[in-house]
Image (cartoon, grey):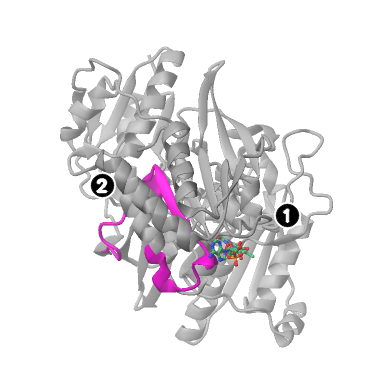
Amino acid sequence: MPGVLVFTESSNGKLKKASREALSIGRTLANAAGGDLVAFATDAAAAEDAGRYGAKKLYVANAGAYSTESHTAALAAAVKEANPAILLFGGTSNGRDLAPRVAARLDAGVASDVDRLEWIDGKLRARRPVYSGKAFATVEVSGTPAIATTRPNAFPAEEAGGGAAAEVVNVSFDAGDARVKLVDTHTPEAGEMSLAEADIIVSGGRGLKEATNFSYIRDLAHAIGGAVGASRATVDAGWIDHQHQVGQTGRVVSPNVYIAAGVSGAIQHLAGMSSSKHIVAINKDPEAPIFRVADLGVVGDLFQILPALTEEVKKAKAH
Amino acid sequence: MNSVVCISHVPDTESRIKIAADGRKVDEAGLKFIVSPYDEFALEEAIRVKEKSGGGDVTVVTFGPDRAQQALREALARGATKALHVKGEASDADSLGIAKVLAAAIKTVPHDLVFLGKQGVGTDNALVGPMVAELLGYPQVNVVTKLEVADGKLTAHREIEGAEEILETPTPAVVTAQKGLNEPRYASLKGIMAAKKIAIDTKSVADLGLNDSDIFNQRVATVALELPAEKSGGKKIDGADAAAAARAILQYIKDEAKAL
Ligand SMILES: Cc1cc2nc3c(=O)[nH]c(=O)nc-3n(C[C@H](O)[C@H](O)[C@H](O)COP(=O)(O)OP(=O)(O)OC[C@H]3O[C@@H](n4cnc5c(N)ncnc54)[C@H](O)[C@@H]3O)c2cc1C
C-alpha cells in the first residue's frame, strides 16, 4: 500500500518539533489514503521517537550532517524504496531547502508552507497562505509522490499511543561529490529561542524608543518561555538582529500567542503574524492598526505594562 | 565574472488583494507591480560581484507576461547589462514548470553564478531557486545574508533557525538572496537613460526547446483562492492601570490560549 513518507530531523537525539508535527498530520493522511506512515532519518536512533508518532518503518540513510546534496541523494533513494503516495517535510530551514531539490529530482510537485492537508479522491489537497497571509490558496498536488512542507505550529504534534519503535530499513545511496562544505556555524545569540519553533512570541517595535529597551521584551519573553520578535523599523535602526524580524521581509510566524508592544501594525508586519492564534497588542495609540488584528488590545504605555506583566508571569509560574 | 539573476514581477507589497472572477487567481486590474523584493537583493549582489571582479555581464531573466518587461527595464536601470524575457503566463505554471523555463533560459547565457530571491513575494513558495539548482546540476546556497566570491569559489552565510551557517562551494552555483544581504541601490537617471538603449531579448517556451505540456502541466494546481475571514474584532481595554492590565493579559493567555 503506498503511504506517507516523512523526512525527519533530530536534535540532541530527539525528533524536532517540526518533524513530530509532520508525522502527526502524516498519520492522518496515511489513514485516509489506506497506507502506512513511514519516516526517513539519517540515524537509526530516531526509530523509537518515530514509532511513538505512528511510523511503521524508518528508512535510514547514513548521510551525515545536513547537506543539500547528500540528503537529496539519500532521500531520493528512500523514496524509490518506499514508493510513497505522499512525501512530507516539516517546514524547517533544512526541510525547505531540501524539498524543492528532491522534487525537481523526482519531477514532482510541492505545496510549500501549508497549514491544512487532506487526502481527497486520491489527491493531496493543501491550503497555504499566499500574499503574506492576505489570502489563502487551496492547491491540489497530482503525481507521485505529492510533496508538501508543513508550516510550523499549524499541525499539533500528537503521539499515536502505544506505538512500537519503527522497524529500521537501511537505505544505500550514492552520495556523489557534495560540493557545498560547511565551514562554520555562528550562533549570534546563544540560548535564545528561534521564532519558527516558538509557541509564544513577544515582539517589540519602534515604541521601545531605543535599543537597550529591548530588555523589556527580552525579560517578558524569558519569563514566559517565548521567543523575541521585532518590527522592521527596529531592525533597520540596528536595535536587534534581522533574525528576529517578523513580517513580509522577515519571518512569517503563527505561534499560539503573539504579544506585540510598541508595534503600529503596518501591513507588512501584519503579513508576518496575523495568522497567530492569539494576538495581544499593547500600544498607546488607540487608533493603531495592530488593534484590528488583536484579540486582546491594551491601550497604554508599554514601559508600565510590560514590567507589570513580566512580574505577573513570574508569579504565576512560581505557583 | 558573469551572473544571471532571475527576477519576478509581483504585486506591490502594499496592495490590497482582490480575487478574480474565476475564484482561483488574483484580480490584476488596478494592481501596481514591482520587482519582487528578494530579487532586488539578488540583483544588487550580482551587480556588486561584477563591479568587484572588474567586469562581466549581469543578465536578468524573467518568465512572465508582457508586463514583466517593466521588471527587466527596472533591473537594467539599476545596473544589469543584459535582459532576457521568456514570454508566457507564468502564473499558469507551477514552481517546477517555472524552474524548468528558467533553467533552460540560464543555459543560453554565459554565467559563473546564478542568483534568485529566496522566494517570490506573493506566491511565497520559496521553491524555484533549489529547483533551478537541481535542474542545472549546480550546488545551491539558500537564504544567503552575506556572500564573498573569489578564485572560482564562493563563501556564503546561510540563515537557519537562530543561527547562521558559513558554507563554501565551487562555482557555478545557485545563490538565493535573503534580506540583509545588501542595501539595493536605486536606479539613477543615467541608468534609466542607458537602460532604454539596451534591447531586451525575447524568447518563447518553445524557443527554449521545452513543451508547453510539461511547463503548464500543473503538478500543483490552485483550485481556490480566498481571503481570510475578517477578525471579529477583539476586545480592547484601557491600560492606564498597568497592574490591572497585566493581570487581564495573563488571564487571557491562561484562559483563552491555554498557555503557561
Ligand atoms: C517592502 C517592505 C517590506 C517591509 N517588511 C516589513 C517586515 O517584514 N516587518 C515589519 O515589521 N515591517 C516591514 N516593513 C515596514 C513597515 O511598513 C513599517 O514601517 C514597520 O513595521 C513599522 O515598525 P513599528 O511598528 O515598530 O514602528 P512605528 O510604525 O513607528 O510604530 C511604533 C508604535 O509604537 C507605539 N508606541 C510608541 N510609544 C509607545 C509606548 N510608550 N507604549 C506603547 N506604544 C507605544 C506607537 O503608537 C506606534 O504605533 C516593510 C516595508 C516595506 C515597504
In the image shown, does B170 or B182 lie closer to the viewer? B182
In the picture, which quadrant includes the C terminus of chain B? top left
Label 2 element class: loop
Mark nearer the viewer, 1 or 2: 1
Task: Say whether residue B248 is visible.
Answer: yes
Query: Above or below — where is B1 with respect to A315?
Result: below
Residue at screen point 18% across, 22% down: A165
Q: Chain of mark 1?
A: B
Label 1 element class: loop
Report which quarter residue A189 is drawn in: bottom left
Q: Is residue A264 left or right of residue A169?
A: right
Which residue carries the number 1 mark?
B15
Please, what is the three-letter code of the amino acid marked with disc 2? Ala
Report which quarter residue B76 is drawn in: bottom right
Query: Above or below — where is A8 with respect to A226?
Result: above
Query: Above or below — where is A35 with respect to B156?
Result: above
Residue at screen point 54% across, 50% down: A281
Q: Chain of mark 2?
A: A
Callout 2 environment at 10 Å: few (<14), some (14 to 19), or many (20+)?
A: some
Residue A179, x across and y down, in percent: 30, 59
In the image shown, does B15 or A32 lie closer to the viewer? B15
Please, what is the three-letter code of the amino acid marked with disc 1? Ser
Q: Exactly how many numbered labels are in the figure?
A: 2
Magenta-colored span: A186-215
Q: CA distance from mark 1 to mark 2?
A: 45 Å
Which residue carries the number 2 mark?
A175
Residue B154, x across and y down, in percent: 36, 71
